[in-house]
Amino acid sequence: MLPTIKPKNARSKRALVKRSSKVIENPKNTIFIRGSQTSQVIQNVLKDLYSLKKPLALNFSKKNEIHPFDDETKLEFLCNKNDTSLFTIGSHSKKRPHNLIMGRMFDFKLFEMFEFEVKDYKSIEEIKGKTCASGIKPLLVFSGEPFNQDDTLMKLQNFFVDFFQSEKTDSICLTGLEHVISITVDPSASTPPPTSTVDQQQNYKLYIRSYYVNFLNSGQKLPRVELEEMGPSIDLVTRRHVFPTEETWKKATRVPKELFVKKTKNITHDNLGNKLGRIHVGQQDISKIQTRKVRALKAPKVNEF
């Protein structure tokens, strides 16, 4: 458990308020940590993922003795100190070669994490072609039936959406859609757990591909779209994972009451933000309506005898 920090002055108090929970949260930052032993493949993977996440990313290039599956306190300390909700750790050992751990925090406590083995990898530098600018919001494409059937892959899909998203926007320009990330699961390459072991899960193989979007002239109003592989190209095999409890999941996905807009009857808003109201009135007798008194329209007097 991390200790509760009490502010000593106004400056530290403002910093704590900035990190505290909000109705509309800030974009999540990601910390990339290099383990005590890493291979060149893992270092290149961390470098390319860091380039995709910039500017919402922080890279630790020095070696760190960190093992989150055994003890998560050091990881929670680093995430709390650097105000990062997402993390990626790369390591390499004889037991777990080319190991990649990705996860996220909730209230600076470990929420969930996934462990992968990097199989086939091509960096951005190896794939020649166009590259998108830094900070571009990517389009995510998930392919494969297990994403809708397996509980682990459903949570993994939710994590990747949270990991690759950047600042939330209400609208986006068409020319700003330059980056597409495709994540495909291969059900035929999955390995079922052995029957003799306990607490083993089925391993899936994921194909992560990154593409650059080319808008070509089509002779019409809408351009012709072609995808060009940009890199990185990563094949991941799932290993261990840690999921949150049901109570923690409900706390993390709870929507604040301030975001629920109470609908007022007969009141609407247009695209410019103007408030419009609708008034219902009863049936009116036109003969009794007070109008302008014009002498020509005055009813003539009737002489009585």
Image (tube, helix red, strand yellow):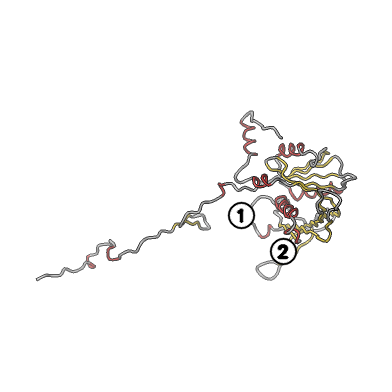
Q: Quadrant of residue 190?
A: bottom right
Amino acid at the residue labelled 1: Asp
Which residue is at a point 80% across and 50% down the rendered structure image?
Answer: 48
Q: Quadrant of residue 128?
A: bottom right
Q: Quadrant of residue 32?
A: top right
The image shows residue 296, relative to residue 207, as above or below, that is below
Q: Position of residue 265 (x, y in %)?
A: 46, 56
Which residue in the structure is indicated by mark 2? 215
Q: Position of residue 150 (x, y in %)?
A: 75, 56
Q: Residue furthest right?
A: 94
Q: Residue furthest left?
A: 305
Q: Dot 2: within a 10 Å radius of its alpha carbon, few (fewer than 14), some, or many (20 or more) residues?
A: some
Which residue is at a point 67% across and 67% down the rendered structure image?
Answer: 222
The image shows residue 236, relative to residue 66, as above or below, that is below
Q: Position of residue 219 (x, y in %)?
A: 69, 71
The mark lying in front, picked from 1 and 2, is 1
The Cα–Cα distance between marks 1 and 2, rounded to whole angstroms, is: 22 Å
The kind of secondary structure element at disc 2 is: strand
Q: In this view of the protein, which residue sits in the foreground, 36 or 193?
A: 193
The image shows residue 143, relative to residue 47, as above or below, that is below
Disc on the earlier residue, 1 or 2: 1
The kind of secondary structure element at disc 1 is: loop
Amino acid at the residue labelled 2: Phe
Q: Quadrant of the N terminus?
A: top right
Which residue in the structure is indicated by mark 1? 170
Q: In this view of the protein, which residue sits in the foreground, 26 or 219?
A: 26
